[in-house]
């Protein structure tokens, strides 16, 4: 098992929900970056 510190704790807490949550957060951040670049 990888030791990721806080991420390891989050995965331990959320279990199977961790992956879709991380994907959603990554997608939201990516979208905001694209919007920010588009406005610039």
Image: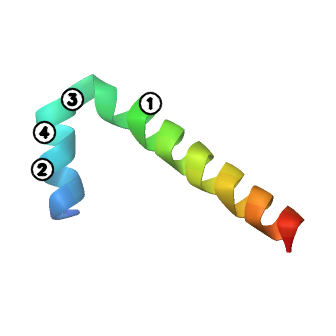
How many angstroms separate mark 4 from mark 1 (CA)?
Answer: 14 Å
Disc 1 target residue? 20
Disc 3 target residue? 15
Q: Residue furthest bottom?
A: 40
* Point 61% across, 44% down: residue: 27
How many angstroms separate mark 1 from mark 2 (CA)?
Answer: 16 Å
Quarter containing the C terminus: bottom right
Q: Secondary structure at mark 1?
A: helix
Residue 34 is drawn in which quadrant?
Answer: bottom right
Disc 2 target residue? 9
Q: Residue furthest front?
A: 39
How many angstroms separate mark 2 from mark 3 (CA)?
Answer: 10 Å
Disc 4 target residue? 12
| Vertical placement of residue 32 versus 23, above or below | below
| Label 3 neighbour load within 10 Å: few <14, some 14-19, many 20+ | few
* Point 20% across, 31% down: residue: 14
């Amino acid at each position: 098992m990888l030791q990721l510190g806080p991420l390891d704790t989050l995965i331990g807490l959320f279990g199977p929900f961790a992956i879709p949550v991380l994907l959603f957060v990554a997608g939201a951040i990516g979208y905001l970056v694209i919007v920010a670049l588009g406005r610039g």
